[in-house]
Image (cartoon, rainbow, N blue to C red):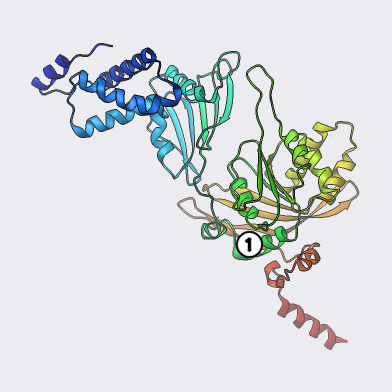
Amino acid sequence: MNITPDDVDHAEKRNQNVDYHKIKSFLIASLIRTLETDQVPQSQTGKATSRLLSQIYAKAGLQLPDATRGKLFKEVLDELVGYGPIQPLMDDPDISEVLVNGAAQVYAERNGSLFRTEIVFDDNDHILRLIERIIAPLGKRIDQDHPIFQARLPDGSYIYAVIPPAALDGPAITIRKFGKEKLTISQLIEAGSITESIVEFLNACVAARLNIVISGGSGSGTTTMLNALSGYIPAEERIVTIEDSAELKLPQEHVVRLEAKPPNWDGRGAVTMRDLVQTALQLRPDRIVVGRVGAGESLDLLQAFNTGTEGALISVRANSPREAIARLEKMALMAEPDLPVRTIREKIAFGVDLIIQQARLRDGTRKITQITELAGMEGDTIVLTDIFKFEQAGIEPDGRVLGEIQPTGIRPLFSGRLEQAGFKLKAQIFGVNVAEMLSQGRKSSSLR
């Protein structure tokens, strides 16, 4: 890549612009050579790159307009010490996820809606260079023998990357950004994700130490709900959190945070979720909060629930309360294939008290669609009773889903536990019309 001051002078004399891409490529190539020659340590690359960029620009005699120069410097620095073309998406606080499907396909999620951006990479090699640079400071590797990579980034975001031969159409990246602030209950109410009545009910359930499962598909808001409900755990209680990738942000001080670790490139050194669950149970927790149950740790949790562990909050990937039970059952069988299915179902039925079903609706909004009590067993079947259920009223011309979660009129069997914890909830929360009940009672008396 050759460019000289004469290129700039001649272009200006002809009233033409120097090829912006050519200058950018020249500066990047020069910086890489200089950094390699000077053997700049990885930890000092950021500061050194900015200083060297100014020196190389001045030495080349380049004199671009201030606005163009500022844009050029940012893009060069993004390329060498940032996230390259997707840096603007990483800087945008409203973007929650960035997905690169190829050089010309970059998507992002904003406020629950996925859209295709105008961002493009030069080619697949450009994407691969970005992946390699991101993971280099983490002491990780990705190559044809190890084409799949996942890790937590320094800012708390989580990156998933896959390259050929596992990715048939070229390197792909998904970055789940780590929100700087967690959503509060009041914000969830304002967004229509939850109602004040349900907040009052769930607050009582957490305080009464019910074992609660938050169920939902990918991107449905289970982590957000887990964060929100964890805020109701009393500050004096010892909490142990267990996550595959750390996303929970609890306000309490007495918190022990555990995170799973994937194996090293040689296949050793893994710390599984099951390892962490078994460890957590030895740490004298008052509460256990599990970011996502996905394997054999399900059995350890169910056994703990049936032997005195109370007030746990866990999440699973499932699209309905019934499917959540099936998932827990299947994962328990992964740990103990010879265990009778009925035994597992009994552990679920008598260990789990409540399932909160989260869903991402077609308009991108995230809402609670069901709150379901596990009401025991009938034969080999776990009895589920909906306490609240989302009722869709229609769809607006703009695609917005109309509807609200409503009480079903059924009080949960664990109402006594809520009262023992000091929460005597009004009958209206559950859709029970007390006046109508009294009226019907008076009519029955008069008929006698």
**Image spot of residue 417 (x, y percent):** 79, 64
Q: Which residue is mark 1?
A: 199
The residue depicted at 69 percent of the width and 23 percent of the height is 269
Q: In the displayed structure, does residue 118 sit left or right of residue 107?
A: left
> Foreground residue, 8 or 385?
8
**Image spot of residue 391 (x, y percent):** 63, 58
- Residue 246 occupies quadrant: top right
Q: Kindly give the residue lying farthest to the left in the view shown.
A: 13
In the displayed structure, 421 sits above or below 377; it is below
Disc 1 crowd, CA 10 A, few/some/many (<14, 14-19, 20+): some
> Foreground residue, 18 or 384?
18
**Image spot of residue 60 (x, y percent):** 21, 18
Q: In the displayed structure, does residue 356 sit left or right of residue 7?
A: right
> Foreground residue, 307 or 173?
307
* Residue 173, visible in the rendered structure: yes
The residue depicted at 73 percent of the width and 36 percent of the height is 276
The amino acid pointed to by label 1 is Val
- Residue 283 occupies quadrant: top right
In the displayed structure, 60 sits above or below 321; it is above
**Image spot of residue 373 (x, y percent):** 76, 56
